[in-house]
Image (spheres, rainbow, N blue to C red):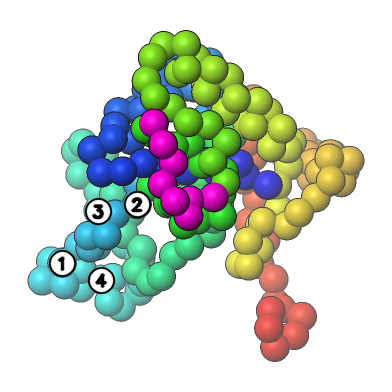
Amino acid sequence: MLPIVCVCGLKDSGKTTLCVKLLEMLSQRGCHVGFIKRTSEEVLSPVSTDTGKALGSVGSAVLLGPDGARLDMAGQWDVGGLAMRVFPTKDLVIVEGGKSLRFPKVWVGNEVSKGVEGVFFTYRGGDEELEDLCEKLLEMARKGHKRSRVFTPAGEVPMKDFVADFVRGGLMGMVRELKGVRLKRGWVRAYVWCEGEGEDS
């Protein structure tokens, strides 16, 4: 499964600063990282804008500009589902915030707040602690790495390593036989339409 880690702490404890440092360090070491920032504020484009009007009709819209693109997706999203939807090929996803979530947590500060569970690392500042934390996250990314992943609308399908290798071998064998296909190192995406197998499909 895709490893997800929450960086938590009290307000103004330095969560964002730590997240930025980790994203830079992990990326420099070849780890492909996704980032989600949780907030209590509304984040979607206002209904009065063109993008906001489109959201009301289709549920998702992309705002494209000269500096990049922003994806708006309406509805209630849980962090795990969102991470798998937006970052399916990442090695690790870091979430800023999420004290109440079920994922492993890094606590920024001296003392973990009462009721916060799943804290595996307390970060008080300092280069040695940062290096130690980075190594722990790299290890989590390595353990969570699979050579193939299968997603359905319900989420990622759990597979043991040998099953993931079997799926990869079968799919890549067929893709390589297609005329004009030249493959480079990296993820290959395949989308397959399913007609469904029951009322809950």
- In this rendering, the answer to whether 117 lies above or below 138 is below
Neighbour tally class for label 2: few under 14, some 14-19, many 20 plus, Cα within 10 Å: few
- Residue 72 is situated, as x and y percent measured from the top left of the image, at 31, 59
Q: Are marks 1 and 2 in contact (CB under 8 Å)?
A: no
- Residue 27 is situated, as x and y percent measured from the top left of the image, at 47, 22
Q: Which residue is mark 3?
A: 63
Return the residue found at the far left.
48
- Residue 4 is situated, as x and y percent measured from the top left of the image, at 55, 43
Task: Name the element at disc 1.
Answer: loop
Residue 34 lies left or right of residue 67; in this view the side is right
Q: Which residue is more in the foreground, 195 or 9?
A: 9
Residue 161 is covered by the magenta coloring: no
The numbered dot on residue 46 is 1
Q: Residue at x 41, y 11 (%)?
A: 127
The numbered dot on residue 38 is 2
- The first of marks 4 and 1 along the sequence is 1
- Residue 94 is situated, as x and y percent measured from the top left of the image, at 46, 39
- The first of marks 2 and 4 along the sequence is 2
The amino acid beneath tag 3 is Leu
- In this rendering, the answer to whether 71 lies above or below 129 is below
